Image (cartoon, rainbow, N blue to C red):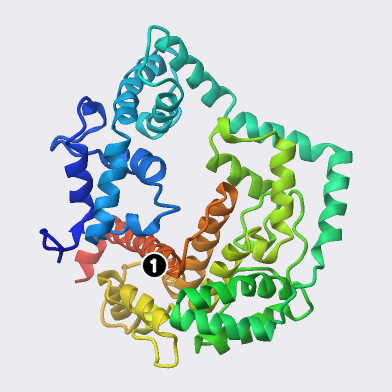
Amino acid sequence: MAVTGAGKPRLRSVVLAAAWRRIPDVEVLSAGDGGPLTRTVKKIIDPLVVRTAARPKLGRPLLEPAAAAEVTELVLADASRLRATAAWFVHLKRQRRALRITAGDVQDVCFPLAYELATGYGMPGPDAPEAAASALRELHGEGDEAGVAQLIAYLADPRAAADLTAALHRRWHTDAGLSPDDAVVLLGRFAETLTDAAWLAGSAAGHALGLALRRPGGADALARAAEAASGSPAPDLGLQRGDRTAVPPLRRQDEAGPELLERSVERRVRATLRRLPAGERGAVAELVDDEARRVVAGFGLGLPALATCFALGVVLAPALRPLDGAAPGTVPGFARQLNAQVAREGYVFHARRALAGTTPLTPRPDDELLRELREFGKQFLGRLWIRLHGFDVRGDLPADAADVRDLVTGVVRSTSLDLRTKVRRALVARLPDLEAVS
């Protein structure tokens, strides 16, 4: 537990609250205790002020003194813009009502937009109502829905579709520049030590392993590589449908499958549209071209360092078996630590008792819930890829091995929290039945 004081780690929430209280005129963004609202942290402070995606060490729940000082400095340095953000939020709420816009939660939608207006205009002036209304019309009228409509129309054009398909097939079979065996050696060292030296040496490993998946028998080769590096048998990780990665199509009807590396270009660009504000997007044709370049890279990630982060996830995922208890000693230390972090969760203990037959997880069949718990590694890997794709879209990179460790640890924690929530909801929904059989 954290103990505040000189030289002691501090809770991040306490650090943020202390800095926030030093900024006047931000009451509409503040909670009753004077600290920032949870959504203020999620929608403004973390992504826009502190930028935890690029500085994951500043997003840890417990901050060392230097990190706490840096967070405080970043928040206070942005004080004038945060005051303007609060003022713009008031105008946006009024104009949202006037325009009868009901899509999305008002804080989720308007907090980032208020910060954007504060960045562009400073404090609101006499024309603030008109500017706020215009920004809302652009966001809701020309935002995701309009972007998706333009994307569908562009991919439906026969000439554009033919050119894109030809380019994908032409670029698909690329020399990795590093043999899969050499890549496994580098990743094994990286997974065990996570040092900056291993991080730099392994920067080409992810790309090589991703490209190796496209060869006949690529899935089996990757499974052997992951088992050699992780010390655990590799289950199905949901990367592809067959024994090698197929060229992703431009579009796929009713696409909902988990196969990460065979997602259509349309599905990937839709994700880009959700991640980038309207003002930061290029033309749809440019977004599609950018995504097509990522598609043909190793693991579908254009930046080699991000491909290596994903390859590390492939190495770690087989060892993430919290329902089996502690990982064996042959597993890399970092993987054992991550697995133990989840295995200690109360909902995991409850599920293990249910599997042992001593108490029901829920009184009705739990097949789907138990399958997700058994496939923790697969759930983790899917979430990790989505996070790394977002990094790729924004051009963000982990700075060093410590940032990679924080990123992976955060994704494991997020996966665990999501599964814990599902178990809790199932238990609450079926509590009367549980009481009846107890």
Q: Judge left or right: residue 409 versus residue 184.
A: left
Give the residue furthest to the bottom.
329
Evaluate whether residue 243 shows in this view. Answer: no
**Viewer-nearest residue: 111 or 126:** 126
**Viewer-nearest residue: 412 or 430:** 412
Q: Judge left or right: residue 430 versus residue 229.
A: left
Q: Judge left or right: residue 167 versus residue 146.
A: right
Q: Amino acid under label 1?
A: Thr
For the N terminus, the image quarter is bottom left
Residue 431 falls in image quadrant = bottom left
Residue 325 falls in image quadrant = bottom left
- What residue lies at 88% left-to-right and 39% top-to-bottom? 158
- Up the image or down, 386 lies above or below 278; here it is below
**Viewer-nearest residue: 260 or 346:** 260
Q: Check disc 1 and report its element: helix, strand or loop.
A: helix
- What residue lies at 63% left-to-right and 29% top-to-bottom? 146
Which residue bears the numbered disc 1?
Answer: 409
For the C terminus, the image quarter is bottom left
**Viewer-nearest residue: 54 or 354:** 54
